[in-house]
Structures are given as C-alpha cells and as structure tokens.
Image (spheres, rainbow, N blue to C red):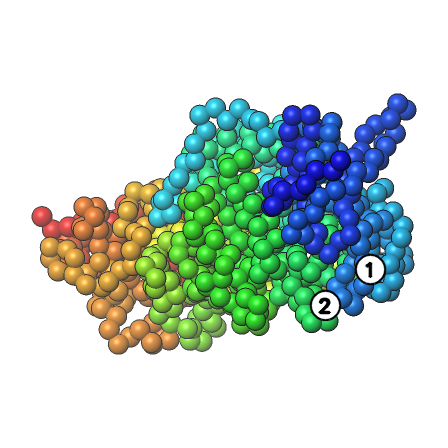
Amino acid sequence: MPTTPPDVPPPPGVHVTSGGAVFSVHASGADGVEVCLFDRGPDGTEVERRVPLRNQVYGTWFDTVDGVGPGQRYGLRASGPWAPERALRHNAAKLLVDPYARAIEGGITVAPPVYGHRVGADLKGDLARRDDRDSVAYMPRCVVVDDAFDWGGDAPPRHRLCDSVIYEVHVKNATMRHPGVPEHLRGTYAGLAHPAFVEHLTSLGITAVELLPVHTFTHEPELVLRGLTNHWGYNTLGFFAPHAPYASTEDPQGVIDEFKGMVKILHAAGIEVILDVVYNHTAEQGQDGMTLSWRGLDQRAYYRLDEQGRDIDVTGCGNTLDLNHVATTRMVLDSLRYWVTEMHVDGFRFDLAVALARGKDEGYDPDHPFLVALRTDPVLSQVKLIAEPWDVGIHGWRTGQFPPPFAEWNDRYRDAARTYWLRDLAASTAGHVGHGVRDLATRLAGSQDLFGGQGRGTTASTNFVTAHDGFTIADLTRYDQKHNEANGHHGTDGSNDNRSWNHGHEGRTDDPEIAAERRRSMRNLLGTLLLSAGVPMVGGGDEFGRTQGGNNNPYSQDNETSWFDWDLEPWQEDLLATTRHLIELRAKHPVLRQRSFFSGRPVGAGGSPDLAWYAGDGEPMGHRWDGPSVDVLQALFDGTQLGQDSVLLTLNGSAWAAEVTLPRAPGSAAYELLWDSAWERPGGPGLTVPAGGEAPMTSASLRVWRVVSRR
C-alpha cells in the first residue's frame, strides 16, 4: 500500500540514508520524473535502470530509492507536455543533469540528440518539433558522493578586507607551465596548492585567490564547431560540482577531495579562496540551445521568460536564471551554502550580479529578495561577497549601488588609472592636453562618490586595473588595438575601450627606450593599484608582466596564449620584486588601507588633515582641480591619528620630467623616498628632501615618501 507523502518535500538533491537514498527534484510542469541509475553489467557494459519518483508536493518530485550509495552514477528524465508555445519543453528521451549533483563525470558530446527539438548537422532546426532520439550516449553522469573529509584543524583565515590583497587566477593557467610543479599536477587543483605556487603567493603577500569559475561547465556548440573550447568556464552545467577536468584524478570522489585539499592547504598558508560564480545564466543558452538540465525539468521556473515564452536575456549568453522564483533562488542559496559549509570557501565574486537582482519588472532592485537573503543568511552574510555590478540589460551598469556588506568591482577605478597613466600620457607625448587629475584622485582615496552611502567605506571598492577579460598589464603597454583573431570572431569580440598605449610601436620591440618606458608604465599601474585606498585585486601574472599577445578576450584559448610562462626574463624578475615591495609597503603603512573614507579635516597635532592634496608646486590644489593641464598630483595621507607614519604619494603623469616641490605640510619636516617607479628594481638610491624642497621627477613616474615629522 503506497505511503502518504509528507506535507513538504525533502530538500532537493540526493541524500544518502541507511539502505538507500532520497532523490528530490523540482519539476512543477512535469507529469513524472524518473531517476536513471547506471551500473555495469557482467560484461562491463553500462546498464540503465529507470526508477520513477512516486511522490510530488508543490512541484517537487521525490522518493527513496533502495540500494543507492556513494559512487552511484545517475541522471534524470522528465516526462510531460511538449508545448513550446506555452514554454513547456518536456522530453523523456533526454537524459538530464540533476541541478543539485555534487559530482559530474564525463562531458557533453555536442550532437543533435542533446537538443530537445529537431536540429540538423549544423545544430539548427525547428524549435516546435520534438526530437525523440535518446541523448544518453552523449551526456555526462551525475555521481552520488560522500561528504566526509579530514579537514583537521582547518579554519578560514578571515582577513579583514582592508588588509586584503586579492589575486585573480585561473586554476589551469597558473601552473600549466610551472617548472616547479610536477607535470601530472600542472593545471589542477593540486597544482594550485603545490608548494611551488603557494610559495609564490605568500612571497608576494597575497591574502586571497579569486578563482575563475570552478563549477562544472561545458562548451558552447558554436565553439565546438570551430574546434575551440570555453576556457574560462562562464558556462555552468552544475552549481554544486567542482569542474572535474581541473583535478589530477578522474575519480569523481577524488575530484571533490582534491578541491577540498587545495582549500585546506591554502588556508594553512593564510590564503582565502574566493570563487567567481556564474548564477546569472546556464550552459543551455537560448531555447534554440541544448536540453541538458533545467530547461528539460521546468524552464518556466528556472528561466526568465517573456509572455510568449521566449528567453529574456540580460547576460548576453542566451538565457537568464530567474531569481524571482523560489525554486531557482533556493538552488542558488543552497549552492552557495554548500561551497561554504562543505568545501570551506571564503567568499564569492558574483558574475553579472545585476542580473541576479532584477525584479519582475526587470529593473534592478538593491532590496531584491535574493540580496536580502544573502545579507541575512547566518552563513553567507559572514563571508566575502563581491559583485560585478553590471549586466548587459537595460540600465545594467550599477557600480556603487549594491547594498552592504557587498564589495564591488570598481570599473571606474580601472578606467581612471589607465586614462591617467596611458591614454593621457600618450596625449601628452603628442602635445595634447589630458583629462586632469580629479577622477584619479577620487579613485586613490577610495571612490567615496560611488561607495559613500549606507555606512560603506573604502573596502566596498575592489580596485583593479586588469582582470581576466581585457588586456594584461603588459599588453596595456604594448598594444593600441586588440588582436583577437584566434578567437574566431574576426576581431569583433572583446572590448574596444582599452585605454591602452603601445608607446610608439605595436607589439613586441627590441627598442630599448620603448621597452624601458613600457616597464615604467607597468610599475606606475601596479604602484597606483597597490597604494590606493580600497581593496586591490592583482590580475594573475601581472606581477611579472605576462602577455597574451594582444588578445583581450582569450576565453577560448586553452593554450600558451593563456597559460602563465614561468621562464622569466630579467626585467620580469625585477617587476616581480617590485610587486612584492609594493605589497609590503601597503602592509607596513596602515594609513594606505583604512576602511573609513577621508574627511579632509584636521586630525594631526599640527593641524594636518587626514588626506591633503597638493600640486607639483607644493601648494594645495585649490581651484586647480578641474584644470586639464595639471599633470602632477601629490597626496599626503596622515597617519598620526593611527599612531603610524604618514605617507606622501607624488605622481607625474606627463611625458616630461618635472621639478616637484614637496609640500610644507603641518608637522612635516622632510620626506624619505621609499620607492620610485623610475627604479627598475626596489632599493634605488636613498633620498631625503626637506619639506618645501625640490625633487626632480622622471617623466611618467610615481614616488612614495615616508613623512619625517618634526620633533
């Protein structure tokens, strides 16, 4: 006699019990859901056994399946109406990935049977006509896993944001060519946790790695047809499962254990793990795409659709997950909690975060239920939350508009730093006038114009000058134009607003003068980034000037274009030493990493303000802020209120050497030079200049001074 189902369904996913496992999946429009169990027969061939889920409550299908335990391979099938005009696309011939699968084995073979509708060899076809070919041979398998792991004494480092230096890095790129990592571990989670790479991070002073997507992902059909792959991973197939090809083992349980082991080792070194997560869309693309999971289960629940049942795409990837629906919101929140509680990660960077907070009217809502849930959840509210504050929908650019405790990628910072040190410098070389210093000064001080509300501080600004999408720091100084031909889009992909400058020659050059100017520009950008108020994010490899050959969108380049080359030339060793020195300077001087914004009011015993601005003549900026001809800017950060040294930054953004007068600031007797971007390597000639004295500066250079106070 059948049992009466409970009032509420069990939690989604697979939960092992004594003697079996409970399967639970949301598919509100389906007539039935089957679990497909895959085992090996006596001859070693795969055998599929289908078990219908007998219970359905509130759109969730569930049941206990006997004999299931860790290691069991499985998939799902959903039967129901095929009515694309009503956004119903059920097709029992299609094996589906469990949205809650914690391990996924194998990949997708892009072929017509993985489409719910009929397509030809070109993967184009009739959206209204159902395809009845079985996709089982072309789909990966979900795997039931054991969550047990020996974490030992693992504890999150919990660095304060004001003390953080984030390192954005791709798991494979980092070690694929690293000579200190054993060959079988290169490009893997274990490779990232190898002592050779961990020592590189700790010697730099990195406090957190921000990993490009590690959720299981797959490759867009159009890339596969061109013989390319999605290398970056912004094409999610599973929000709970780590990407198996990044592991050194093929065993699904081993993949999870290797990821956990990586986190444990990085934590032991004092390094946090932040994941770049893509909850704004999935790998199914638009309705003309493959049927892999969500669309075959309940596309009306999981995706934003218009009144005609068509995808509302604010991601540029064909679909948008609907976080106004309870099933989707729960899936995302459950995924996030899983990565914190079971995988021990320390935070998240939300790709195209505006797409996650669009209301039913499609407008961005800072009080969207999903954002409220994150801010109030006892687990998720305690980890680092970083928003990419834009998407490609209408009114999608929202920098500065996310609520606390979110930090945000600050694109305004990126643009200001590049404009001052590259675009305006190029203009100066040609005898033209640049954009002045006001915007750069605002960014140096923490971008209060963007993040000054709701009790936020400088740490709401994640500062960066490069990221995975765009030029590397070396290529910013080598190329005026992107060179993306290898991506197969005829050069149309990637940003055209790079604000780069090739210093007079496109690409590599043997001209020693141009090469020296480029190196100084790299040091200027790194110095500005690492000495500004806010949280610096270093693009992985920028610390030694890696190049992508001018490709500013190598999302499909799983090759030497993207993999770090660790065979460093002497100038790269010098740049690496410079980056270490700059991060050390930041750590030694708390005045450069304050959480609170600067008031400009007196704080020192001599009446000095917490932050004072001076021009190249040593006098206060005053009315000269809006003068486009102002190239030299001086910023004096007063540390006396912290019981620490005060620091003066002097920036000369012109193409000409300058005689700079150091300010006669209250309480300042002299200035001791700590670093000069004109130095190829830290430790240049010592220099102390009295307050009010002149200090000649090289063209296009940045200096850091320690203020010697009057006794």
Q: How many marks?
A: 2
- Which residue is located at x 87 percent, y 47 percent? 134
Mark 2 secondary-structure assignment: loop
- Which residue is located at x 39 percent, y 39 percent? 158
- What is the x, y in percent for residue 493? 67, 63
Tag 1: amino acid? Trp
Mark 1 secondary-structure assignment: strand
Rendered-image quadrant of the N terminus: top right
In the image, taking residue 254 as reference, residue 449 lies left or right, namely left
- Which residue is located at x 50 percent, y 30 percent? 264
Tag 2: amino acid? Arg
Per the rendering, the mark at residue 397 is none
In the image, taking residue 573 as reference, residue 311 lies left or right, namely right
- What is the x, y in percent for residue 460? 39, 56
- What is the x, y in percent for residue 543? 48, 45
The local crowd at label 2, few if under 14, some if 14 to 19, many if 20 or more residues have their Cα within 10 Å, is: some
Q: Are marks 1 and 2 in contact (CB under 8 Å)?
A: no
Determine the CA span between mark 1 and mark 2: 15 Å
- Viewer-proximal residue among 192 and 668: 192
- Viewer-proximal residue among 274 and 533: 274
Residue wearing tag 1: 82
- What is the x, y in percent for residue 21? 68, 32
Choose top left, top right, bottom left or bottom right for residue 363. Answer: bottom right
Residue 183 in view of the camera: no
Residue wearing tag 2: 310
From the viewer's perspective, is residue 346 above or below residue 312? Answer: above
From the viewer's perspective, is residue 558 above or below residue 362? Answer: above
Dot 1 or dot 2, earlier in sequence: 1
From the viewer's perspective, is residue 120 above or below residue 63? Answer: below
